[in-house]
Image (cartoon, rainbow, N blue to C red):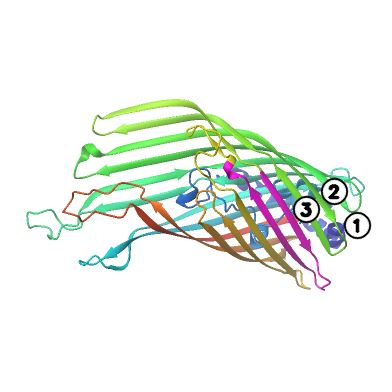
Amino acid sequence: MNTNRLHNEGALQAGRPAVRRMLPGVAAMLAVVMVAGAGFAGPQLTSAYGDQLGWISAEINAMGGSGTALYRGGYSTVFNPALLSRASGYRLDGGLALDQEHEDRFQPLFDSFDSYVTDAAIASNRHHYFDTGFALAGRPGGEDSPFGVGLSLTERYPFNYTFTEELRNPSPYPPGTGEPARDAIIAERTREVSGALRDLSVGVGFEVNDRVSVGAAAHYGFGTRTEVMRSRDFVIPQDSYNHKSAFDMNGVNFTLGAHGVINERIEVGVAWESKLSADGDWTQTDYEAATDTTIETMSDAYYKYPQTFRAGLALRPRTDPRTVFTMEMEYKTWSDMEDWRVPGDDNPQLLEDTTDVRIGVQHEFYNGMAARFGFRHIESYADRDASTSVFSAGVGAPLGGGMFSASVELAKLTTIQAHQFDYPTDYFGDSFVVDPMARVEDTRFRIGAGYKVEF
């Protein structure tokens, strides 16, 4: 029983003429998707090895990022390649998303009697990032073939993070008094992490019988992680510096998956993704104003990312129009993460294994419109007490023989983090004496748009 084929057959026959007319537009969309660079952001907490809240497509992210037990076109290569066997004809997906990252940092404020008053904001950053992705899936042997294939380009571990601040003079004297001026800029400081580890994935799914499918996918991971730490000191110029590191990495891993149809209402899926060893060259460039010299070094480096286990359930209740619920969990053994800069095999960084719970629902109306909702709860690999909750929603609308989708996501994360830069302890008395840690509130708002067409 191929439930996906039954669901899509009518739409396929009706959409083919329109698809032929729009092929030039689809080709242009694909070119834009392929050329656009990676750009998603994450919080400070995950800037070392990549953010956990990745974006795949508007349709998928609106449903909580689920796809282990539900066919997602070519994107099934990164969820569960067994589902590629559910393809009927060919399907092309493309999309674009805008991510707005808010970070606010707070310190406790005390009065002259050392009594706590409130939390005072010490830094606030607002930055925007974007990303694209595409996927292609099909059944080259026709409807009678048990094989389906898929290709996708996705952003798996985005590194982007930006922190900027101006250190200003707390002097009580106004300008023109001959004393240090109030609010004059003492230093401008920035930490900027950019880049992403992307996956170019190819997979195949095989339909063992009407109820069971298996599949495998290979992933070529590639990307460059760049980090810049710079400080421009206007009071003591020789304390200025600019440190930059760039890690150009690549590696290969694979995913194995299985999918089963319990009955016409319930489907299940499981998948396992192997470890990824991303190797490459690490280039370090350090400039110190005190000596006016730049030192550049290069080293062989590697990140060894953990394996991943996924299990999911898709429920199709007896409703008309159709509704589908998805529930799944992803487990990653981050305690196995290895970094060439931190020697040792027994989790020297004390990273945490994580669970990622994803829930989604889609309801289709008689006019072909779709309403989608999702929830996601992700544990952090860098802090056992931190986790992110994500609420998402979206719509799908038939357009030009395909479907246009839009999504919105809202996520919140609160952590206790060390300061990015040291603060002076002997400037205007105790004006810059601070607690060594800050409460960091991260709020992310993301919108996405995508288009899929079957032909």
Q: Amino acid at mark 1?
A: Met
Residue at horizontal 65 percent and vertical 50 percent from the top: 331
Label 1 neighbour load within 10 Å: few <14, some 14-19, many 20+: few
Q: Quadrant of residue 174?
A: bottom left
Pair 3/1: label in front: 3
Disc 1 is placed on an element classified as loop
Disc 2 is placed on an element classified as strand
Residue at horizontal 21 percent and vertical 45 percent from the top: 234
Query: Visible in this render: residue 363?
Result: yes
Question: Camera-side residue: 256 or 237?
Answer: 256
Q: Quadrant of residue 390?
A: bottom right
The answer to which of marks 3 and 1 sits earlier in the sequence is 1
The answer to which of marks 2 and 1 sits earlier in the sequence is 1
Q: Amino acid at mark 3?
A: Gly
Magenta span has 325?
yes
Q: Which residue is mark 2?
A: 213
Query: Relative to 425, is 266 above or below?
Result: below
Residue at horizontal 59 percent and vertical 43 percent from the top: 35
In the rendered image, the quadrant that contains the N terminus is bottom right
Query: Relative to 251, is 99 above or below?
Result: below
Question: Camera-side residue: 361 or 257?
Answer: 257
Disc 3 is placed on an element classified as strand
Query: Could you say where residue 71 lies in the image, as x and y percent from the top left?
Result: 77, 54
In the picture, the disc for residue 1 is: 1
Magenta highlight: main SS: strand
